[in-house]
Image (cartoon, rainbow, N blue to C red):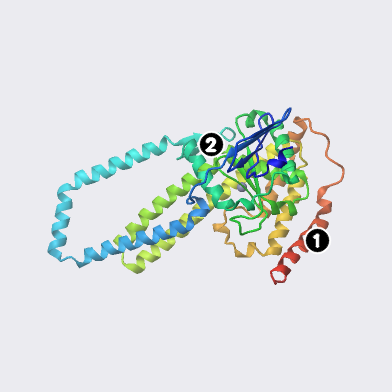
Amino acid sequence: MYSKYLQCRTVICRRKNVLYSTITETFLSQYKGSVRKWEFLKLQRSNFHTTQRLHYPTSVILCFGTSLCGLYIRKWWLRQTPIRQEKLINWYRKRRHILNGTLGFMSLILFIYCLTCFERDPIVKKSRLILFNQTQQIENAKILYNLLVRNEDNVVPLSDPMYARVGRILKKLSNSNQEIFKDYHWNVTIIYRMFDILTVPNVLILPNKNIIILSDIFNFITSDDQLAFILAHEMAHEILLHTTETISWGIMCDIATLLITFLFWLLYEKRRAAILCSGMYILSSSTYAWYKRRCETEADEVGFQLAIKSCIDPREVVVFWEIIKTLEKLSARKNFHIPIFMHHPSSEQRKRKIIEMMPAALELRRKAKCPELPVWDPKDYLPYYRKVIEKLIRKRLKILGMQL
Ligand SMILES: [Zn+2]
């Protein structure tokens, strides 16, 4: 019924507290079924910039500019005669109470402001740094959406069965986690390529609760239970406020890095400043990566619980991580990563975490009055799944003129 309106860009379907609808650039319309309601919203175009992993080039340029600034001021200072330097030092000494006091007061105001920017998430009850209000988050999401999707033709049409499959799983997740999901309206967009370039099996969530699914993921998952876990993991990121907290910490880290870079180039000679800056970048990148890995682990734990409550087979999640491990091995993706800079724990670590949580998951399943698990173990099919993945990767590499 709704497929003939397909100029759709994003699908949101509302069933009780789950929402699937369609964002178009051209019209606003609605499909009203007995239970489902299709909504067509307007997509607003914005310019791209910002955030987390996507703003690295900007950060690098800013750091480079700050270093040059510090270096220029240092050189200017060294060019001054000792008398002139003495004069400037005296000028500062006379006003140091005012200058230091102003700086201290501004830092205190900033510190107090930051303290007011903490929010507690509804599940783990941790305090999270949130520097953006709702409107700014939506604006950030629009920018990211445009950056990721790039082109209207990159969006899978609403008539595609993938949407129905995702909708069915979202409904199940929503019905079994009503107390948590009651205030959340999830949007789903399925796209062919990331940035309209990369075909990768990936799923991510934007700060406006828009889940972006790369259609390639459907080539690798082998059951709806695995998809339920993936979606629940992304939803957990949003519920735990990771999407906004990550951007907030990213900005704080950037500001601190720029300030320290400036001071290093101002106070030390070139070689020492370069060494100190390199050390600081390694430290800040590894700290940020550690924070990101912690978020992923947290989202895995909470997402797994959300998915379990919708009666998935927990063994399917172990199979999923095995599939990802195989995929990484075949595409040699792991070889390019240095563990301390990785933003995600390894697939093996994530699989082990799920196995650790298995007894609690079975108990949660029992409490949710889920049906008994099938007698056959999905892990028994792993050799077959591996062969299928290998065949697929070989085929892709052949197209690229490469060999496995
Ligand atoms: Zn994640």
Q: Is mark 1 within 8 Å of ligand 1?
A: no
- Tag 1, which secondary structure? helix
Residue 310 higher or lower than 343, as above or below: above
Front of the two marks 2 and 1: 1
Identity of the residue drawn at 72% across and 71% down = 403
Quarter of the picture containing the C terminus is bottom right
Residue 377 in the image: state x and y as whole percent.
83, 47
Q: Position of residue 224 (x, y in %)?
A: 76, 44
Q: Is residue 293 visible?
A: yes
Say which residue appears at 38% left-offset and 37% top-offset. 113
Residue 5: image x %, image y %? 68, 41
Q: Does the Cβ of the disc 2 residue fall within 8 Å of ligand 1?
A: no
Q: Is residue 23 left or right of residue 99?
A: right
Q: Is residue 309 in view from this perspective?
A: no
189, above or below 67, in the image: above
| Residue at the extreme right | 375
Q: Which residue is mark 2?
A: 126
Q: Amino acid at mark 1?
A: Lys
- Identified by mark 2, the residue type is Lys
The foreground one among 373 and 189 is: 189
- Which residue is tagged 1? 387
Contact (Cβ within 8 Å) of mark 2 with mark 1:
no
Quadrant of the rendering where the N terminus is positioned: top right
In which image quadrant can residue 2 be found? top right
Q: Where 378 sits versus 80, above or below?
A: above
Residue name at image x 65 percent, y 41 percent? 11
